Image: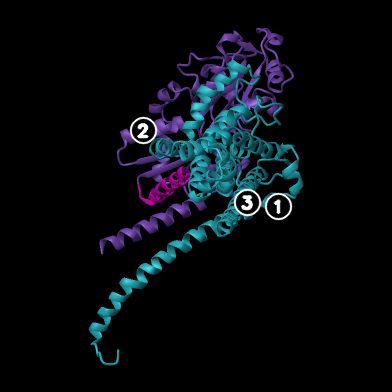
Chain colours: A cyan, B purple
Amino acid sequence: MSTWNPTSQEKKQAGREMFRKEYFWRNLVTVCGILIIALTLSIGVFLLYKGSGTFYKYGHTVWEFLFSSDWNPTDGPSQSGGAVGSAIYIWGSLITCGLALLIALPFSIAAALYMTEISPKAGTRLFQPATEIFLGIPSVVYGWVGLTVLVPFIRSIFHARMGGFSVLAAGIVLAVMIFPTITTISADAIRSVPDAYRKAAYGLGSTRWQVILHVVLPAALPGIMTGVILGLSRAFGEALAVAMVIGKTRAFPDSILSPTSNLTSAIAADMGNTAEGGEYNLALWTMALLLFLMSMLFIMLIHKVSGRKGKDHEA
Amino acid sequence: MWNKRLIAAFTSGLLAVSLAACGSSSLAAAAAAATAAADSATTAADAGAAGVSGSVTASGSSALLPLVKAAADAYMSVNADVSVTVNGGGSGTGLKQVADGSVDIGDSDVFAEEKLDADVAKTLTDHEVAVITMAPVTSKSLGVTNLTTQQLTDIFTAKITNWKEVGGPDKDIVLVTRPSSSGTRALFQKWALGGASEADNKALETDDSGTLMQTIKDNDGAIGYVALSYLVNNTDVQAVSIDGVAPTLENTYSGAYKVWGFEHMYTKGDGSAAAQGFIQYITGDAFSAKMEGMGYGVAAKMSSAAVSSHK
């Protein structure tokens, strides 16, 4: 710097060059990053602000919201005194997701094993791309197929009382939706199990089944769990496809052939019609907050599970 | 240089999308769905264009939506200088958006006072643009064409659960309703069921009248209710008379058929010149034949007997 004596013009030029090369792009990228963080935070804060209104503005208890099934909020600008028990919706969300997982998990793990351990060639060339295409199908398509094929099928096979709209239909639709998520992530996890593990097990005289069951699956478990949690969070937040086949009857289901309702379809059905800031409206916001908190919980679980995975590999 | 501008444009676009998703309360709930973000971006862009003279935006009631859409197309073909953009979203959304100025016209099934604070509702001007008539519908195969108000009430409150109790075949009744916040439902409950609340714990709920029609058609023994506009050219379901009065526009005009309501278009104050022009067109004589053809009633044709019965 001391030997070079630039004119002010040159200085300006160099400064501009420096700005362009370094600061501008670096700052742009930083701003983008901060924007995303700010966006997530502001959605969280917004939901917290709106969703807590049920409790402080209308004086309902958290206990009532979570565990009462008496749902009759008032819908008007200055009315209050209704009931916001959302237990039916919460239970509906939980039971459909649980059923979906129960249906999807065996298929997902079997498919993941097939495309990694049994037939890796067909797996990577055919199976994996096919599963990934599954991921891209919009949920309305699943819902539509569920409504036109699955619901009539359940109606005619099981003679369901409410015309085929049922927990079973919702569970199957969700199972098909989360199957590709769990499968692809499980397959990745199984693939990343070091080959040395398998060779060691074979060297000790294990059969292929024993290698898979006792070595590969336990080693890939954290990855499979991540897939399960991601699948669950997709199922939990899915609104459209479930709403089309669940029947949205506001009652606890008697059996898996009974219709019920869930959080997302209740929000989707009523949000646009309710009075802004009214008891009904805020109760729906509280449901949205609950969904947000659930997905946060799922994400924290993933971090916990994948953290364990890292430690396992070090050991 | 150009790619710097491109990225700046992209960034601001991203910002607009995210802000729009935050700002619109009803859509923020569905923010998880990428489509919702895209929709709200469109809405925001439309709302932004409202300042330009000759453009009108409307949102709200889904029951009124088909009519407003048809009117918008017809109006734009006679008046090429005005562009009309119409969205659904529900009555609550329409009223909120017109009150805060995001749209020029808020379509609603109900009076603004029912959804907004009194002092906010006061700033809006009500235009009763059409009459909507609700009809109970059942599956064709049942052969039920008439029910008394009492029978209808008992059916929807689940006191009667089999069609044989009202003269039909021995079949379980499957109730199909609309969401409890729906304007269609509020209207039906008030005028057809005498205010009795429907048995939600025994009914299938459908988000829109199209799905409701499909559900009725697919399920023997199903009963629900839709606006007359869904029954134009319909052969799939059976419209049911109440106390011997058929759900038709003529019976609505004369006051013989009770289950109807005014559809409202609200403007903030008097509304923009373009919005006023559009509302005048939709209520005008030129459009009334088209309106009746779509199954909506013309507000001006309501007899005083009919109007006073709903006061």
Q: Nearer the viewer, mark 3 or mark 1?
A: 3
Q: Residues within 10 Å of mark 2 (few under 14, many from 20)?
A: some
Q: Which label is found at residue A57?
A: 1
Task: Determine if residue B73 is in view.
Answer: yes
Pick the residue in front: B298 or A30.
A30
The residue wearing badge 3 is: A297
Pick the residue in front: B244 or B3.
B3
Residue A149 percent coordinates (x, y): 51, 22
Q: Chain of mark 1?
A: A
Secondary structure character of the magenta stretch overall: helix
Identified by mark 1, the residue type is Lys
| Cα distance between the residues tagged 2 and 1 | 44 Å
Q: State the quadrant of the C terminus of chain A.
A: bottom right
The residue wearing badge 2 is: B73
Residue B241 percent coordinates (x, y): 60, 14
Q: Which residues are magenta?
A: B27-53
Identified by mark 2, the residue type is Asp
Task: Determine if residue B90 is in view.
Answer: no
Looking at the picture, do discs 3 and 1 lie on one chain?
Answer: yes
What number of labels is visible? 3
Left or right: residue A54 versus residue A222 is: right
Left or right: residue B158 versus residue A106 is: right
Residue at disc 3, secondary structure: helix
